[in-house]
Amino acid sequence: MRFRTIPASPADPLRVVIVGAGGMGRAWLATVADSPEVTLTGIADLDAALARDVADSAGLPDLPVGTDAAALARQTGAQALINATTPEAHHPVTTAALFAGLPVLGEKPVAENVSRALSMAAAAEVTGELFMVSQSRRWNPYLATLRGMITRLGTIGTMTTSFFRSERFGGFRDLMAYPLLIDMAIHAFDSARYLLDAEPVTAYCQSYNPPWSWYAGDANATVVFEMDGGTRYVYNGSWCSPGEVTSWNGTWRVSGEKGTATWDGDHEPVLDAELDAGEPADSPNFGIAGALQAFVRALRTGQPPSGEVHENVMSLAMVEAAVQSATSGRLERLDDVLERAHAQALREETRADVRNALAGWSSVRDILAGTERMETR
């Protein structure tokens, strides 16, 4: 997708407003403070007192705050928005910003469901503004090294992720129907798409809750995805597994025709094959700092970044397909998930211009992949 560019450099940093003064908002505040390419002009939150407290605690007593992100951006001369709100607020906040002429870097997941995500992708098309989703694991250099190893293993038969933690969060996660799938698994699903350079075709999920679980919903899940090209990606995880835990990134095994690559999630991956392991990937920034750097670079160059909304939606679709399979007990086709979400987006869209953009999509998968958008230029 083509989008409006904005020059930015340490000599002329990109001016941004952060919206959302919760935990992720504070994390983004620290990340922006450490970046020479970005400067903060304000913090927006529905709770203005909280935004004021966060700014004061960061040693910024004169920083403007407000409850309306787009209005605060106009007031302070901001050029872009960082959306660190809750998933339910992503759609209204990001859409308003895009139509106010502000590119957006948003927290994952892109939205609370795929239909909302499709609406946001269409809004980015209509406005010509960049909307990028921060999938922080994409910027882990060990993940990039593993991807390089995978390209040398020939045809991949199976890739697996094991994720086992014992987390007592309290709050909303304890009450979710599928806390592991909805709150955490998207990181692994997105990483799988990146590692295999492949998209999901089908999903089959069994989720369940062990008798000792402190979660109301299913804290355990096993999902099998068929990816295009035939590789199976298997995710097996738990939020309530006492004892030895895995990395927050999970542990990975990739089995190919020429050998195997493994990654413990925290250190250099290992290649077990009669091949040279290759050079480790070089990435100057981990996590959200890497996402911020990519966002600024994209606005400067016009090159779509990893995490551009169309590219990112399929990671959320994997979550939705897994949840639907866990509910139905059947294998779910990703194209069916996309088509149902598209129909819902058309029914619920309130902006005529966005609805018209959605109605012009003949294939949701092709639109997300960029194929149809390229053909219609």
Image (tube, helix red, strand yellow):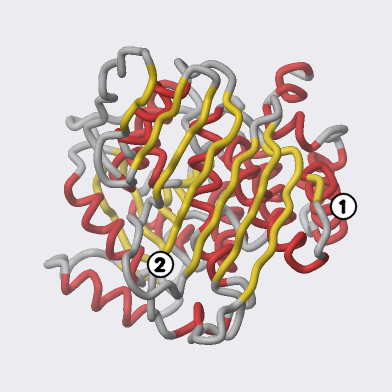
Query: Is 117 left or right of 159, judged from the image as shown?
Result: right
CA–CA distance in space, label 1 to label 2: 30 Å
Please, is residue 376 above or below residue 125 in the view? above
Label of residue 20 in the image: 2
- Quadrant location of the N terminus in the rendered image: top right
Specify the quadrant of the image occupied by residue 364: top right
**Residue 343 location in percent, x, y?**
87, 52
Residue drawn at 26 percent across, 58 percent down:
29
Specify the quadrant of the image occupied by residue 233: top right
Spot the residue most to the left: 59
Residue drawn at 55 percent across, 29 percent down:
196
Residue drawn at 30 percent across, 30 percent down:
8
Query: Is 171 left or right of 232, judged from the image as shown?
Result: left
**Residue 299 location in percent, x, y?**
42, 30
Three-letter amino acid code at the position of disc 1: Ala
Disc 1 designates what residue? 343
Please, is residue 254 above or below residue 205 in the view? above
Classed neighbour count for the residue bearing mark 1: other residues with Cα under 10 Å, few (<14), some (14–19), many (≥20): few
Q: Is residue 102 visible?
A: no
Spot the residue most to the top: 275
Local SS, label 1: helix
The foreground one among 181 and 13 is 181
Please, is residue 206 above or below residue 374 in the view? below
Tally the marks.
Answer: 2
**Residue 252 location in percent, x, y?**
43, 43
**Residue 182 location in percent, x, y?**
58, 64
Three-letter amino acid code at the position of disc 2: Gly
Residue drawn at 35 percent across, 58 percent down:
246
Q: Is residue 178 visible?
A: yes
Local SS, label 2: loop
